[in-house]
Amino acid sequence: MLYHIKNLKKIYKGRTVLDLPELIIEKNKIYGILGPNGSGKTTLLSILSFLEAPSRGTVFYRGSPVVFSEKHLHALRQEVVLVDQHPIMFSTSVYKNIEFALKIRKVPLKDRCQIIKDVLEQVGMLEFINADAKNLSGGETQRVAVARALACFPKVMIFDEPTASVDKSSQLAVEKIIQELYSEKNISVIMSTHNMVQASRLVHKKIFLLNGHHVDSFV
Amino acid sequence: MLYHIKNLKKIYKGRTVLDLPELIIEKNKIYGILGPNGSGKTTLLSILSFLEAPSRGTVFYRGSPVVFSEKHLHALRQEVVLVDQHPIMFSTSVYKNIEFALKIRKVPLKDRCQIIKDVLEQVGMLEFINADAKNLSGGETQRVAVARALACFPKVMIFDEPTASVDKSSQLAVEKIIQELYSEKNISVIMSTHNMVQASRLVHKKIFLLNGHHVDSFV
Amino acid sequence: ADDEKVIKMSTTTSTQSSGLLEILLPELKKDTGIEVKVIAKGTGAAIRDGMDGNVDVIFVHALERENKFVEDGFGTKRYAVMHNDFIILGPKNDPAGIKGMKDAAQALKKIAIGRFPFISRGDDSGTHTKEQDIWKAAGIEMEKNVKILSAGGKDKEISFIYPKGSEKWYISIGQGMGKTLTFADEKQAYTIADRGTYIKYKLGRDQALDLEIVCQGDPVLFNPYGIIPVNPKKFPHVKYALAEEFSQWLISEKGQKLIADYKLLGEQLFYPDAVK
Amino acid sequence: MDFIKDSFISALYLLVSFDPDLLDIVFVSLKVSFFSTMLSSCIAVPLGFFIAISSFRGKRAVITVLNTMLALPTVVIGLFVYSLISRRGILGVLGLLYTQKAIIIGQIILIVPIITTFTISAISRIDHRYRKTAMTLGAGPFLTAVVLLREARFGIVSAVIGGFGRVISEIGISMMLGGNAKGFTRTITTAMALEYDKGEFVLSIALGMILMAVCLGINILAGYFQGKISE
Amino acid sequence: MDFIKDSFISALYLLVSFDPDLLDIVFVSLKVSFFSTMLSSCIAVPLGFFIAISSFRGKRAVITVLNTMLALPTVVIGLFVYSLISRRGILGVLGLLYTQKAIIIGQIILIVPIITTFTISAISRIDHRYRKTAMTLGAGPFLTAVVLLREARFGIVSAVIGGFGRVISEIGISMMLGGNAKGFTRTITTAMALEYDKGEFVLSIALGMILMAVCLGINILAGYFQGKISE
Ligand SMILES: Nc1ncnc2c1ncn2[C@@H]1O[C@H](COP(=O)(O)OP(=O)(O)OP(=O)(O)O)[C@@H](O)[C@H]1O
Ligand SMILES: Nc1ncnc2c1ncn2[C@@H]1O[C@H](COP(=O)(O)OP(=O)(O)OP(=O)(O)O)[C@@H](O)[C@H]1O
Ligand SMILES: [Mg+2]
Ligand SMILES: [Mg+2]
C-alpha cells in the first residue's frame, strides 16, 4: 500500500474542499483522479506530494503516518515528485532548471549533462536546452516540467493535468512516458485529467472526486 | 476585413518565432488557430490583441494600419479583448476582478452587479462571486477569465486555449458562449486550441501554424 | 606604529576648527613622540568623555566645570594654557547703536531694551554660559524655565534661562559656533562669538559674513582654556604619564610660544596664559 | 545599563508630564516628516513606477544614478539647499532658510531616491502578465498603473514607511536648514543632538525613546489600515 | 551657484592630487561601510527571509517593530552603543570606543532593520509556487531559500545597496563612536562635518562630491556584476 488516507479534510476559511473518510492508493499502478473544476484534485495531489498539510486526518505513506512538519517531510519529498498544473520555471535556463533536481540528488557533475539531454529528448524539447526557461510557451513549459520531474528519479510521480496545454503529438509522448514509468521503472503514477478518453486508455484505477468527496463514478 | 497582416515577423533574440507574409481574418466569423507547441499561436494572438508589437511588418485592423504606440493602442484595446492561456487574476475578489472591466467602460454603478452576475452565471461560477480570485483552482480561474472578458462587451474576442484546464461540462458551456457571441452578438472570435475535434465542431476557418509559418494543413 | 605612545584627547569643536592643533600636534610628536587622537565634540560631551574614562586628557574652555571635574577627582590638575576672547557681533547698520562700546553688559542691555533679534547658542557651551553671565551682569531680568526629571531616584533639573519677555527676539538655536554665526548672519541679528570662529567666517571665505564686531575688549569676555589629565586613580587604564607629559609640554616655553605665534589669516587668536 | 534604565524612566516621566515644550517639538517633527514623506511619495512613486515599466535607453544608467543618490549625505543636501535659499542664494528673497519649509525641501531631496528605488524594485517583480491583463481589459495608462501599484502595495508601503523612518530620524538637514530654533524648527532629533552636545545623554536617549514610541504608534496605525485595505 | 562650481573644481583638484590624507579617509569610509554592509546583510537577509516565509503568531508585530526601527535615530544608536562600550560600560574593557570596530557595530544596528524590511517585502512578492516547486524537486530548506533569494534578487540587491548608501553617508554614528580621529576613524562624512563646522563649505561639498563619485563607481561595478549574473 502506497498511501492510506483516513478521515482527511482540507478546509479553507471554513469551506471544506476535500473530505475523504478513507482512500487507499496502491503501489505500482497508474491512478487517475477525475472530477470537475474545483472538486479538489489539485488539493489532493498537493497533500499526496507532501506540499500541503491536511486540516484534519492522517495520511499513511508506505505504512507509516506522515508527520507534516518540514523536518520530516524533506526525506519523503525526495521520493515523490509533483508536476504542477501550471508549472513554474526558475528564471534560469532550461538546463539549469533540470540540473537543480540533479544537484539536490548529488548526481556527479559529469553525468548531469547526459541525463538532462535524455529527459529533454523524451519530451521532445532537446533543442531548447539552453533556452531561457521563463520564455517558453505554455505547452513547452509543461513538457520541460515533465522532463525536470523525470530527472528526479522518484518512486512516485504525480501529474496534475500533464497534457492540458500540450499538443497532440507531445500528448502521446507524455502518455508514453507515463506508461514506461510504470512498466519499465516500477514507478507509481498518480495523475489528474479532464480527458476521460485519456484516462481510460492509460490508468488502472480511477478516483472520482465531486465537491471534495470520493464518489464511485459520475452520473 | 477585420485584420490584414502583411510581412509580419516576430523575432526574439534572433529567433524568428512568427513569420507571416500575408494573413487575412474576416469579420463575424469564428477562427481557430491550430498548431503544435511553440508554433507561435500565443504570439500571434498577443499581436492581434495589440498587446505586443511585431518586430517587422504591418497589421491592418478594420482597414487602417495599426500604430504600435501606447497612445494609439488604447482605443483599439477597448474593442478587442484577450483571454490568456494562463489567465491572471488581480488579487481582489472575483466580483472586483470583473467590475474592473466595467469601471473602465464607465458602466454605471447600479448596473454592474447585474452584469457581473450574468457573466458568472454563464460560466457557472456564480457561487464564487465573493471568493478571493487568487485562490481559485486552475479551471475556475480560466472560467472567471472568460466571464471577465465577456463583461468587456468587445467587438472581437480572442481566446488562447480557453478550455485547456476546464472540465467537460464547462467546456461545453464555454463552447456555447463562443457560439452565441458569434451568432447573437455579432462578435468575431479568434481562438487557439489543441483540440482538433473542438475546432472542427466550432470554428468556421482554421489557421494552421507550424514553426511560425502559416501552412495549409498538417500532414 | 608605536601604539604605546598614542593618547586620546577630547576637546571642543572650536579648538579643532581653529586649526591650532594642526600646528601643535606635529611639534609635540617631534619633541616627545606622543601622538594624540583628537575627539572633538560639544563642551559638555567632551567633559563627559573624561568622566567616563574614554580619553586620557581633556582640553576645554569652561572654567567652572573644569574645576568641578578636578574637585570630583576625575582629573588630576587643571593647567591654564591660554585664552582667547569673545566678541559681540551685529549687523552693519547696527540698529541698536552699540558699535564701539567697551562694556559688554551695557551693549547687551541696549539690545534687550530695543528688542533687536539676538541669536543664542543655547547649548550650555562655554560661550552660552558666558552669554548668560553677561545678561545677568547687565541687570536684565532673566526668566528661568525649570523642569525636574526624576531619573533613577536622583532628581534631575533641566533649566532654560532667557531674558524675560524675549519670545519674539531671542532665538535659542542649540548649535555650534559656526552655525550660530551663519544663523545670525542670515537673520541679521546680534550674537556672541569667539574671535577664532569669527575670523574664519569673516576673512576665510569668499562669501564673508555681513556681521561686524560691535563690542570687544571687555575683560569679562575673556575665554580661558585648560588642559586636564584624567585621573589614573579613577581609571587605571588611562595613559596618565603621557597625558601629563603632553600637558607639561603645552605649558612649556616651546608650547606657549607656538600658541602665541599662531595666526589665523594674519590675526592672533590665542594668548598664552602659562608663561608671561 | 543604568543609563538606559534612567533614560527610560525620564522618557516616561516626560511623556506623562505632557510638557508643552516637548509636545511642541514632537508636533514639529511629525508635521515636517509627514509633509516630506507625502510630497516625496507623490514624486517618487509615480517616478519609480514609470522607470520600472518603461524600457528606454539609459534605464540602467538612471537606476545606477538613483542607487548612488541613496548615499547622498545630509551635509551635502543641506549645503546645497542652503546655497539656494540663503539670503544670497537665488531663492533668497523667499526667506525660506531656517523655516520648516526649508527642512521639508531638504528632506524631499533625501528620500525621493529612496522611495523611487524601492518602488522600482517592487514594481519590477510584478509578473508582466498583470499589466497585459489590465491592458487587454481596456485599462488606460492610469488604471494599469493602479493595478500594478495594488499588486505591489506591500513593497510600496514598505518604501514609504522606510522614507518616513529616514526623515523622522534624520538630523543633519533639520539642523542645517531648520536651525534648531527653539519653538520654531526644533524637532525631536535636533533636540536630541543638542542634549547630546551638552553631555545630557540621559535626556537625549529619553527623547529618542519618545521618538520611537511615536513611530511605533504610527506604524501600528498604518499596519491596521493596511490590514483593512488588503482584506 | 558659484559655490557649487567652486566645490566641483575643488573636488576635482583634490581627486587628481591624490592627497594621501584624502586617500586615507576614503579608504576608512569604504572599509567601514563595506564591513557594516556585509555583516548586516549576513544577519538581515536570512532574518528577512525567515520572517517572510514563515507564518507564526506575532509576525505582524515583528514587522511593525522592524518598521519602527527604521526610524531609529543615529544619536540613539550612538549613545546606546556608547553606553555599552565606554570604559564604564559592560564591554568597556575591550577598549572599543573610538575605533573603526565601534562604528561598524553602530552601523550594523542602523541598517539591519532596513535590509530586513526590504528583504521581507522582496521575498513576500515571490509567487508561493516557486517555493513549492523547489520543495517537490526535493530541495531542503537551504536550497529552497537559494531559489527564492535568486528569484527575489533584484529586491535584495536593492536592499543591500540601500543599506550601503545609508552607512556610507551616515554621520552621527561615525562621529559619536569613531570620534573623527584623524588617521584612525576619520571618514569622508565626519571630515565633511568637520569642514562644515569650520565654515569651509566648499571643501565640505567637495568631499561630498568625492563620496558620490566613489559610490557611483561602486554602483557601476555592482550593476555590471548584476548584469553578468542575471545573464
Ligand atoms: N488557498 C485557497 N483558499 C481558499 N480556497 C481554495 C484555496 N485553494 C483552493 N481553493 C478552493 O478549493 C477548491 C478545490 O480546489 P482544487 O484546486 O483542488 O480544484 P481542482 O479539482 O484541482 O480543480 P481544477 O480542475 O479547476 O484544477 C476550489 O473550489 C478552490 O476555489
Ligand atoms: N519572450 C520570449 N523570448 C524568447 N522566446 C520566446 C518568447 N516568447 C515566446 N518565445 C518562443 O516563441 C515560440 C512561440 O511561442 P508561443 O507562445 O507563441 O507558442 P504557442 O504556439 O502558443 O505554444 P503553446 O501551444 O505551447 O502555447 C516558442 O518556441 C517560445 O519558446
Ligand atoms: Mg487543479
Ligand atoms: Mg500558447
Image (cartoon, coloured by chain):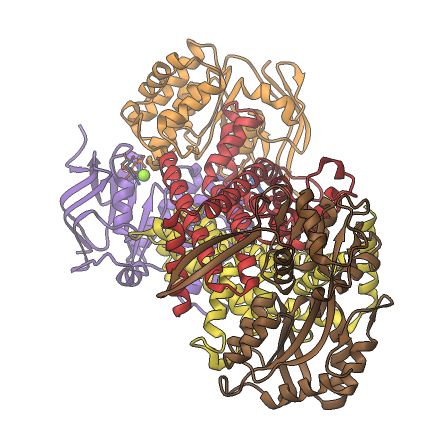
Chain colours: A purple, B orange, C brown, D red, E yellow
Residue B218 versus residue C71 in the image, above or below: above
Residue plotted at (68% across, 86% down): C246
| Quarter of the rendering occupied by the C terminus of chain D | top left
Residue A105 versus residue A83 in the image, above or below: below
Residue plotted at (66% across, 27% down): B69
- The quadrant in which residue B171 appears is top left
Residue E157, given in percent of the width and then of the height, sits at 55, 55
- The quadrant in which residue C240 appears is bottom right
Residue A53, given in percent of the width and then of the height, sits at 24, 50
Judge whether residue D97 can be spotted in this image.
yes
Residue plotted at (32% across, 57% down): A184
* C238 sits left or right of E204 in the view: left
* B109 sits left or right of A54 in the view: right
Judge whether residue E41 can be spotted in this image.
no
Residue E140 versus residue C227 in the image, above or below: above
| Quarter of the rendering occupied by the N terminus of chain D | bottom left
Residue B134, given in percent of the width and then of the height, sits at 37, 36
User: In front here: B8 or A86?
Assistant: A86
Taking the image as four quarters, which one is ligand 1 found in?
Answer: top left
Residue D175, given in percent of the width and then of the height, sits at 62, 52
Query: Which residue reaches farthest front?
Result: C139
- The quadrant in which residue B52 appears is top right
User: In front here: D50 or D104?
Assistant: D104
User: In front here: E162 or C213?
Assistant: C213
User: In front here: A36 or A13?
Assistant: A13
Query: Which residue reaches farthest right?
Result: C266
Instruction: Count the marks.
Output: 0
